[in-house]
Image (cartoon, grey):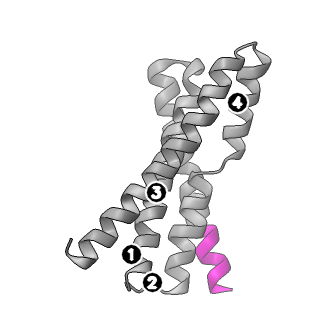
Amino acid sequence: MIMLLSIALGGAVGAVSRYGVTLAITGIYGAGFQPLATLLVNAVGSGLMGLCYGLLATGASMNDPMRGVIMVGFLGALTTFSSFALDAAVLFEKGQGGLALGYVLASVAISLISFAVMLWIVKSMATGQ
């Protein structure tokens, strides 16, 4: 029960944070920049997941409820790819297939690179290299 509550708490904070980023980006740049908000949270969230995973992989301890709050709840809600799929589909339906493809490729590449960089940083720091 504690784990479920931890995930729910983290998920609520992650979802509200994601919504806040979306409001900020679209408020500054306009509704047409919704994909930028999704790209930003996916990249940042993936980097933070890489950081957490790197810490765990190098021996740091994180109890299950804390892992539930941060990794499963908060980051899981912050970086959902359902918005990603919707944004790509909308761009495609608007006849912007090239932009949709670029958005998909950039989202995946930037998120994977962000994860790998943070993982490498944590492991390098842990081994003193």
Q: Give the crowd class for mark 2: few <14, some 14-19, many >=20 residues within 10 Å.
A: few
Q: Quadrant of the N terminus?
A: bottom right
> Who is closer to the viewer here, 35 or 3?
35
Q: Locate residue 124: give its quadrant.
A: bottom left
**Which element is circle 4 on?**
helix
Q: Earlier in the sequence, mark 2 or mark 3?
A: 2
Q: Is residue 5 magenta?
A: yes
Q: Amino acid at mark 2?
A: Met
Rendered-image quadrant of the C terminus:
bottom left
Q: Residue at point 31% right, 63% down?
A: 121
Query: Mark 1 is on which residue type?
Result: Leu
The residue tagged 3 is 115
Q: CA distance from mark 1 to mark 3?
A: 12 Å
Tag in front: 4 or 3: 3
Q: Is residue 118 located in the magenta-colored stretch of the structure?
A: no
Find out whether the residues at labels 2 and 1 contact each other: C-beta distance under 8 Å.
Answer: yes
Task: Specify the segment rendered in magenta.
Answer: 1-9
